[in-house]
Image (spheres, rainbow, N blue to C red):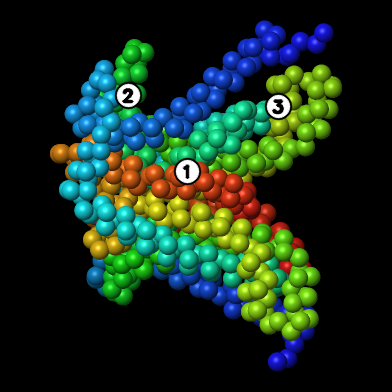
Amino acid sequence: MAAFSISAMQEPRRALPYVAPALALLAFVILIPAAYVLWLSFQQSTFGRAATFVGFANYAKILADPYFWRALGNTVVVVLIVVHVEVVLGLAMAVLFAGGLPFRKLLIAAVLAPYAVSEVGAVVMWRTLFDPDTGFMTRVLTGLGLPPLEWSVVPSHGLALVALLSIWLHLPFTFIILYAARLAIPKDLYEAAEIDGASAWQSFRRVTLPLLMPAILVAMLFRYIFAYRLFSEVWLLTQGGPARSTEVVAVYLYLEAFRYNDFGAASATGWLMVVTSLLLAAFYLRRLYREMFARAD
Amino acid sequence: MPTDPAFTPSGLMRLLGKAVAVALVLAWSLGPIALIVSAAFTPERDIFATGVAWRPTFENFVALWQRWGDFFTGLANSFIVTVGATLLAVLTSTLAGFGYSRWRSRFLSGSVFAMIALRLLPPIVTTLPLFPIVNALGLNDTHAVLIILYAAFFVSLGTMVMRTFIDQIPRELDEAAMMDGASQAQIFRRVILPLSAQGMVAVAIFVIVYAWNEFLFAFIFTTKNAKTAPLVLSEMIGSLEGVEWGVLFAATTVQLLPILAFVVLCQRHLIEGLTAGATKG
């Protein structure tokens, strides 16, 4: 058997058998379908019938649809609330944990627990907590003299519950990213700040926050992109109702495709989601692209 | 004499503040879970009653077993799909991680970039064209379709994690093996695989948690035979006229506890994986 020389090993063609299965999986499940959705978005098409080319008619249709705009508005509001509350809470918890706590491992396990909960499970939990008649939180709210959350009737209350349970489900992710970044800050910086007479707040403002900024941005970016997909929480809690008032973009897409059988409009919605997701990610992808090609040369 | 800072008034205040913060964090993270799990062990008629002493019981689990055989088929399906998706994702990610770690070229850089960009696309978009194709191939309502979908949506994160881990294995080991006449495949099997086990565990954890809990794809692509546990749970909520709360809480508990125990046990690997790959790719 011939020995493999080091130069042969470095020939890039030899990497192909290793990367091919992963790339094939992505191509067949994501890339080709996404391209096909672009094509579908220019067709008039329902399930099981031949498509006809209609140009931008599907886009015109959804952009003229008040339900689309409401779904988009709901999505934007929920995403903005969810991501920013998560970052603030995650940051506060990272600082709390980095400051030293007894039973830290056990406490981190507790904080990670919601990561293990399914969207369905979380919906069962939170709708029970906020059940208008018997929910624990409803009793707490009335006890405090506050109105209960009428999530199945009042659209803004429904979206508030969706936001609350999304924050609950995804806070572990945001927390871990920020906590790991906080632990990576060298101790000497805090010691130096202390010697200079900085208060706890000042050392947070001048040391922690600026050094965590890159991690905060990455966490926010990822959460923007993933929160934007929001579907299950809304679907399981309100199904977009009452009267389509709590729909988000993914629910709108689902209804267009699978309830109203308008694959063209659904595809146009889908492609708008793709473009906006990539625009959201553009900053990150651009930086990554530079790094990639710096690595290649 | 120096005083312990904890016993000065401001030190005490700080300690108290910390204790309150920790209590809030615990109530927030565990409260909703504790509520459902304890309700699952409560007789149905006591669940929503106030001021009743807790009488732990298994009757909700018994009722679940007797009336919702579907749920247990769902658990079995979830198990099959989770194992399949994990094997497929870990295998393809490890192979690709090796490829991207050990070779450089414009094509490889371009393709890894495409991988990351594709991961950012919303999954619901791909259901539109896949739905008719899956139907035409007769794959609707099979384990295979979910296994492939779940693996595909994690192979990109998995590859990034594996590349990070394999990058840390010194190339000198590859070269030494090569001198001894090992082929590339042998290097992969004998050098890389054993040393990248930690990365594989990190990838497996992500896929396991995702596949066990996933709702959207299961909802669209399965109807009966391959229905997973979260989907059966959603049907239990959906029967709005007569939700059997005790049974629903019991089912939620049964679906949750194994994966919760798993996450707690694998805490260290989970954190490692999140920091190794989630943010970098």
Q: Which residue is located at x 18 percent, y 48 percent?
A: B66
- B124 in relation to A196, above or below: below
Question: Which quarter of the image is occupied by the C terminus of chain B?
Answer: bottom right
Q: Which residue is located at x 78 percent, y 75 percent?
A: B176
N-terminal of the two: label 2 or label 1? 1
Mark 2 highlights which residue? Answer: A136
| Element under disc 2 | helix
- Distance from label 3 to label 1 (Cα)? 28 Å
* Residue A204 circle label: 3
> Which numbered disc, 3 or 2, marks the residue closer to the eye?
2
- Distance from label 2 to label 1 (Cα)? 23 Å
* Residue A141 circle label: none
Closer to us: B221 or B195:
B195
| Element under disc 3 | helix
Label 3: how many residues lie within 10 Å, few (<14), some (14-19) or many (20+)? some
Mark 1 highlights which residue? Answer: A115
Question: Which quarter of the image is occupied by the N terminus of chain B?
Answer: top right
Left or right of B9? Residue B212 is left
| Element under disc 1 | helix
Query: The numbered mark 2 sits on a residue in which chain?
Result: A
The amino acid type, in three-letter code, at marker 2 is: Phe
